[in-house]
Amino acid sequence: MHPTSVRRRSVVLAALAATTTVAACGDRQHQRRTPQSGRPAEGQTVDSRSRVVQHWGRITSWLGRHAPATYARLRPPVSPEALAWYERRIGAPVHDDLKAWWEMNEGTYLFAFPGFLDGHAPLSIDGSFFCHPLEDAEERGWERSWVPFACNDPTDPYSGMFHDAKTGFVGHWAEAELPTVSHGTTLADYLEKQEAALYETSGRRPGQDVPGLWNGLLVWDDPDHPLHDDLDGWQPFHRTHRESQGDT
């Protein structure tokens, strides 16, 4: 790893650890903003920023009711100063859609099961900076306008999602692969899919993870071949997924 990358990794990990300690000590003072969770009236159109607010509002509302331990790990809104610092550091602006999300919750604090968006953890400003390749961007096929917003594990990321500030589309990145943009899929579309998985029951493919609950946490897993087989009491949230265990 490049020496600069090593230094940056150490600095960001220290910052992440510090914010976790502060949260554990109860210094957050309940600064989370309660987003509007209502849907637009029939026939009404909304812009992508408003859709981000609506879908994330529905997700956090679900977390508050069904997964309070996960909900408690949501960070407060990003400060204008932190956002300006981040844009200066990466040398590019953040898209309005991602700003809207971070202005509600700046990712999450560190905790045991952060990947509550179908295996991905929402990133804070520090977490996004940690995942950004910066000086290694060109050799990794990374565009300057791509901003990481979620990853598998904020303490040791090897894959995740990014948002293209130029187009508004999301994409996927991984250590062993070139990043790819999902053309036509916006951040609002991504969050709408996550919302639907929580509120709506759908069929499940063999090996597909589903949302489940354990000790107040939202944890995704495969009911038939669980990765987290040490979580006694974990079960799928939707009844149909519970009833189909062992059928695939």
Image (cartoon, helix red, strand yellow):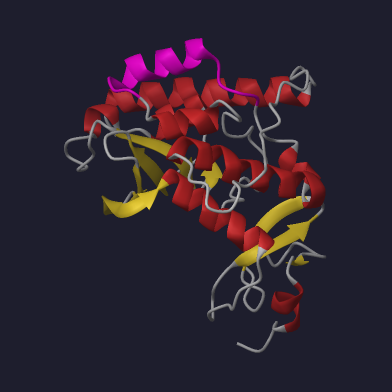
Residue stretch in magenta: 76-93
The percent coordinates of residue 7 (x first, y second) are: 38, 21
- As drawn, the residue found furthest toward the front would be 43
- Taking depth in this image into account, of 182 and 161 the one nearest to the observer is 182
Q: Residue at coordinates 37% horizontally, 53% vertically from top-left?
A: 185
Against 81, residue 64 (above or below) is below
Q: Position of residue 108 (x, y in %)?
A: 62, 34
The residue at the point 52 percent across, 47 percent down is 44
Classify residue 232 as left or right of residue 105.
right
Q: Horizontal and vertical percent for residue 177?
A: 27, 54
Q: Is residue 92 magenta?
A: yes
The residue most toward the bottom is 247
At 49% from the left and 25% from the top, the residue drawn is 125
Residue 181, position as x, y percentages in the image: 28, 50
Left or right of 219 in this view: 49: left
How many numbered discs, if any?
0
The one nearer the camera, 80 or 115, is 80
Query: 186 or 156: which is nearer to us?
Result: 186
Which corner quadrant holds the C terminus?
Answer: bottom right
Q: State whether residue 52 is above or below residue 77.
A: below
Q: Is residue 135 visible?
A: yes
**Above or below for 72 versus 88:** below
- At horizontal 46% and vertical 20% (from top left) the residue drawn is 11
Q: Main secondary structure of the magenta part?
A: helix
